[in-house]
Image: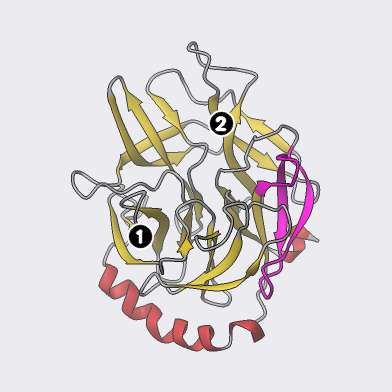
Amino acid sequence: MKPNSFSANVALKNGIALFVIVLCSWTSVLSKSHLYASGYDENQNSELYRINVNTGAAKALGVTGQADLISESGLAFDTHHRILYATGFTLTNPLPNGNPRSALYTLDVKTGLASLVGNGQPVFPEIILWGGGLAYDSNHDVLFATGISSFGFVVRDSLFIVNPSTGIAREIGPSSNGPPEYDLSGGDLAYDPVNDVLYATGFANVEGPSALFIVNPETGEALPVGYQEPDAFLGFGGLEFDPSTGLLYATGYDRTKPFAETFLYVVDPTTGSAKKIGRTGNGVQLFGGLALVPPGKAD
């Protein structure tokens, strides 16, 4: 595939003017797409939601078909083939040790129903994608994922390329090669096709703040753009870039409020700072991914 640019300075400079303009008037900007999210409902069922980007309120579209299937995993919409993908796990084909096998799914955007792609990840190396992020690179027709690879006693946070036909993931490389070690396995990925930048949410320390990262798609290396405010934690939640408005959306929780409450945020791609839009709703926990779906596919 064509090498992506990994100059953080250039990418951030290109985005400064655009973000300043749209941030000041984001409530009046109309997106050309609908924002979808995966998460839990009040009964802890895995559901697909559509989010109101002006208020943060989430509307349930349907249960994915299995409890806890994709509720904490990534979402990505393939704009070329018009398919909504999700990472999760399958219980129908567990690993020899009894653990669930990571898997790729397609989702019906109207009902939320999930369909398994292939048979899940192979036994070795063990790759855990559920809980991680997912993003579709529309410029290079690549499906990226974050997760964990395990080679015996070696366990590391890594970036992967996922084959959309088989669901099999191939490791690109670790997010960091030494201290500080970054954990992107609970956050999400988002691809900016305008500036050719792959973003991720995660954290460097579970006790510390969450952060926005730029990820090198050739090596998997992550570099922090900046950290969120102490009250906003986006290390467990979704991330998505809207090329029609220039806005970077994220879901997460407010550390000053109950953990079960999640919120929609807009993130400054030049600093990582997060501005809260609104609460996702009573009993709605959006710790999964975010994806923009064109209106022709969603309606």
- When the figure is inspected, residue 169 is found, relative to residue 41, above or below; the finding is above
Q: Are marks 2 and 1 in contact (CB under 8 Å)?
A: no
Amino acid type shown at disc 2: Ala
Q: Residues within 10 Å of mark 1 (few under 14, many from 20)?
A: many
Q: Is residue 107 left or right of residue 227?
A: right
Question: Along the horizontal axis of the image, is 173 left or right of 121?
Answer: left
Q: Which mark is residue 81?
A: none
Q: Does residue 36 appear in this view? A: yes
Can you tell which mark lies on residue 103? Answer: 2
Q: Closer to the camera, 273 or 218?
A: 273
**Closer to us: 284 or 237:** 284
The magenta-colored residue range is 39-64
The structure residue drawn at horizontal position 53% and vertical position 14%, both measured from the top left corner, is 98
The three-letter amino acid code for the residue at tag 1 is: Phe
The residue identified by callout 1 is: 213
Residue 79 seen in the figure: no
Q: CA distance from mark 2 to mark 1?
A: 25 Å
Which mark is nearer the camera, 2 or 1? 1
Q: Is residue 172 above or below residue 261?
A: above
The way the protein has been coloured in the rendering is secondary structure
Query: Residue at point 56% right, 72% down?
Result: 276
| Residue located at (42% from left, 56% from top) | 200
Please tell me which residue is depicted at 27% across the width and 50% down the height of the picture.
Answer: 221
Q: Quadrant of residue 89?
A: top right
Of callouts 2 and 1, which one flags the residue occurring earlier in the amino acid sequence?
A: 2
Q: Secondary structure at mark 2?
A: strand
Q: Is residue 152 left or right of residue 50?
A: left
Toward the left, the furthest residue is 178
- Estimate the x, y position of residue 73 in percent, counting from the top left: 56, 43
Q: Is residue 187 magenta?
A: no
Mark 1 residue element: strand
